[in-house]
Image (spheres, helix red, strand yellow):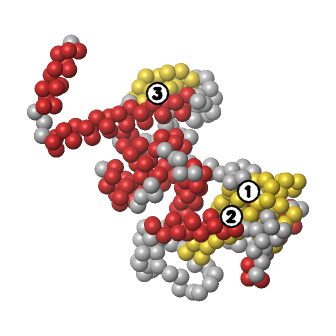
Amino acid sequence: MDHRKFKKRVTELVDELTSAQAQKLIEALKERGDGDEVQKLIEQQFESDVKCPHCGQRHIHRHGTAHGLGRYKCLDCGRTFNALTGTPLARLRHRSRWLKFSAQLNSSRSVRRAAIETDIDKSTSFRWRHRFLQAQKQSKDQSLVGIVEVDETFILESHKGEHRPSQKARKRGGKAKKRGLSAEQIPVLIARDRFGEMIDAVLPDRSQKAVSSVLKGALSKKDVLLCTDGDPALIAFAKSEGLEYELIIASKGEHVHEKVLHIQNVNSYMSGLKKWLERFNGVATKYLQNYLGWRRMLEKSGGKLTPENCLTAAIR
């Protein structure tokens, strides 16, 4: 159709729309634009490191298109794939709504609220949340240097979402049956240096072996001074690795040594983490590492995380 005729025809059709219809048209066009932007981000991320997700080789060529994405074929293993194959978002539908959903993650919205805002089902919202966060679970800093604060916090064990007829459900997060530390409390280890680099992990137990599996290789004997509150497993780990360490024991009234040695940064982060988790009314233990990655992503962004950044991180 001629451009002038097209413009005239569209103008006539728009003039006939009611306010509600015009709003729906605006939303549809916005979603179409979001879909194009998502496709562009996916292709850009793939082109930044072109290789076969099946065998890792780089001898590939174009092999048509499918479902709006270009397909490729590996000349080494002979398998075909697209830019999302091998990523957490592979096979997810409704790509035009991914940016809007990413914005909900940036705002730490609940599953129900994210579903309403994105116009998807609640179960889809839950599935998308953990697919989008899957990559963040592994995107930790590789090394910490200088003064490194290490401490543990404890999150109440939860089987939220699981069907357990023999176990009475807790209401809105609930409380532990026993006071103090017990098997109900899941240990979470967090280590931070003064440059903002951080490593965290859900521990299977409070043993030296569990601590070592998280921190070994990330701390250099020459470049690290460990500050901890006196946890036996952390002390045993530091001694076994030959690391210099300083004990800051709050129960004895100790808070700062030599004006710079303390664990206030890591404790502040733990406090913020627990307060942030409260909005979810209990987090299933099997997904806890995803939430640690989510919080770490928000913290590292310094409040400047965009939906585009969030989506790009999810498809790495």
State left or right for residue 216 relative to residue 42: right
The amino acid pointed to by label 1 is Arg
Disc 2: which residue? 265
Q: Quarter of the image containing the N terminus?
A: top left
Q: Nearer the viewer, mark 3 or mark 1?
A: 1
Residue 71 is marked as 3
* Side of 223 where 197 appears, left or right: left
Q: Quadrant of residue 152?
A: bottom right
Residue 185 locus on image (x, y percent): 60, 76
Cβ atoms at labels 2 and 1 below 8 Å apart = yes
First-in-chain label (3 vs 1): 3
Q: Residue at x 45, y 67 (%)?
A: 279
- Quadrant of residue 293 within the rendered picture: bottom right
Dot 3, crowdedness within 10 Å: few (<14), some or many (≥20)? Answer: some
Q: Earlier in the sequence, mark 2 or mark 3?
A: 3
Marks 2 and 3, how far apart in space?
Answer: 47 Å
Q: Residue at x 79, y 53 (%)?
A: 145
Q: Considering the numbered disc 2 on the image, is that residue within a helix, a strand or a loop? A: helix
Q: Is residue 126 above or below residue 31?
A: below
Q: Secondary structure at mark 1?
A: loop
SS at mark 3 in the image? strand
- Whether residue 49 is visible here, answered yes or no, is yes
Which residue is identified by label 1?
194
Q: Residues within 10 Å of mark 1 (few under 14, many from 20)?
A: some
Q: Label 2 amino acid?
A: Asn
